[in-house]
Image (cartoon, grey):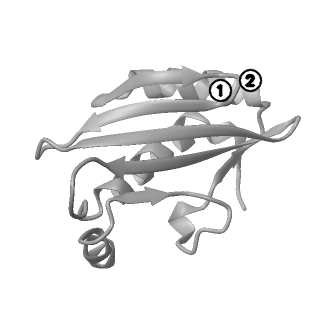
Amino acid sequence: MLKRTLIGLLRSQEQTGDRAKDPMLKSHFYKLSKDKAWEEVISTLKKMQGYKVLHEVQSVGEIVLEKRTAFGRTMDITVSVISVNPLQSAVDIYSASRGSLGDLGSNYRVILELYRTLDKKLAAFKVNS
């Protein structure tokens, strides 16, 4: 956690992906079609406290969220639901803080929180890689 805080002094964004060096930032896969995954993800995100859904485009699979931190900064979060094959989907998250300087690791923690919530909701469909 200290490493993330130090990295956060300089960086004010974080993202997940297949090739992420940090295992916590690897894409999460679910045994659901893109449409089913979309429905589950959007309903879960709309219920989460502290997050506001600003924009959603089902055809592209993108959901844009906003979160205000305790210090008054605003974070813009994009959640992407991607079809890997007809029976499997992936969820990736990009989070960036508005303003200058770093985020002290808050984008990293937000991504982990979103993944924990989604994994809990979609536990029966989670694909362990």
Instruction: Identify the residue at image location x=52%, y=72%.
Output: 22
**Looking at this rendering, what residue extends furthest in the right direction?**
86
Q: What element carries label 2?
A: helix
Q: Residue 94 location, x and y as percent?
A: 49, 49
Q: In this view, does 80 lie to the left or right of 32?
A: left
| Residue holding disc 2 | 35
| Residue holding disc 1 | 38
Q: What element carries label 1?
A: helix
Q: Residue 126 location, x and y as percent?
A: 68, 45
Q: Is residue 82 left or right of residue 2?
A: right
The type of residue carrying mark 1 is Trp
Q: Could you say which quadrant of the image residue 34 lies in?
A: top right
The type of residue carrying mark 2 is Asp
Q: Residue 68 location, x and y as percent?
A: 22, 37
Q: In which quadrant is the C terminus drawn? A: bottom right
Q: Which of 128 and 69 is in front in this view?
A: 69
How many tags in the picture? 2
**Looking at this rendering, what residue extends furthest in the left direction?**
71
Q: In this view, does 80 lie to the left or right of 9?
A: right
The residues bearing labels 2 and 1 have C-alpha atoms spaced at a distance of 5 Å
Instruction: Identify the residue at image location x=57%, y=75%.
Output: 21
Q: Could you say which quadrant of the image residue 70 lies in?
A: top left
**Where is 20 relative to 28, above or below?**
below
**Is disc 2 in contact with disc 1, using a CB cutoff of under 8 Å?**
yes
**Where is 55 relative to 71, above or below?**
above
Instruction: Identify the residue at image location x=49%, y=40%.
Output: 78
